Amino acid sequence: MGISDSATTENGSIEYGWIIDPSASNGQVQSAQMALISVPASADEVEFTVTKGWLDRNAEISEISDEYRISVALPPDFEAFETIIFDRNDDVRRQPVIFDEFMGQNEQQRTLIACKENRVLIPGRRLWRSAEVTLGAYQADKIVVMPNMEGIVAIFDDLPPLSSGVVADGETTTFEQLKLRVWTSEGVAESSRVFNVKGLNSDQERCDN
């Protein structure tokens, strides 16, 4: 059972926790719990005081078995700072941005293979807000947000090859140069890098099947 007190104490702390009844188990009990807290954007650290003990029949603490402190460092939230410093109505400040300098530097790194799963890492800021990623007219099948929210991974299950191209090693190899865009609720970001989709005509039947 989870417990919490929305009111802060005299020293400004917030109390919350869980009550676990071990009587239903014959042995040791391991229970994972989670709490969601909100802190000011300027905070760089949160300190927790963990108290473990036993309650009596009146739900009063009868014994404290352990007590210790945990400090958790918080990464800076630059987006929150921008919202505070700049005008909230300035749409340009909130638009998504792709960091092209951290994407593939050579053509080989920006070449995707048709009929196969392709993953494209897109570093940037504000890319995760209701995002959709397109490569030309092809839409990504799945998007994964990076843990620090400073980038996303776009997953394309099977990009189709073209029907014409250049002859290489006796087989016709198809190429298509496509622009990558990230569409969000705050605007559209376009990468200056051009991506190539490569595939063999012989792969077309396998893709269709």
Image: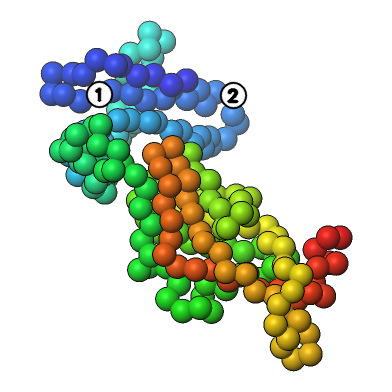
Q: In x, y percent, where is residue 147?
A: 42, 51
Q: Is residue 163 above or below residue 33?
A: below
SS at mark 1 in the image = loop
> Circle 1 sits on which residue?
14
* Amino acid on which disc 2 is placed: Ala
> Residue, x 79% and y 90% (percent of image)?
170
Q: Is residue 208 above or below residue 20?
A: below
* Amino acid on which disc 1 is placed: Ile
Q: In x, y percent, where is residue 53?
A: 35, 27
Q: Nearer the viewer, residue 194 or 112?
A: 194
> Circle 2 sits on which residue?
24
Q: In x, y percent, where is residue 25?
A: 59, 29
Q: Residue furthest top?
A: 58
Q: Nearer the viewer, residue 83 or 31?
A: 83
> Residue, x 76% and y 70% (percent of image)?
163
Q: Which callout, 1 or 2, points to the residue nearer the camera? A: 1
In the rendered structure, the answer to whether residue 63 lies left or right of residue 44 reads: right
Q: Quadrant of residue 5?
A: top left
Q: Is residue 187 above or below residue 140?
A: above
In the rendered structure, the answer to whether residue 206 lies left or right of residue 82 reads: right
Q: Is residue 117 visible?
A: yes
Q: Quadrant of residue 79?
A: top left
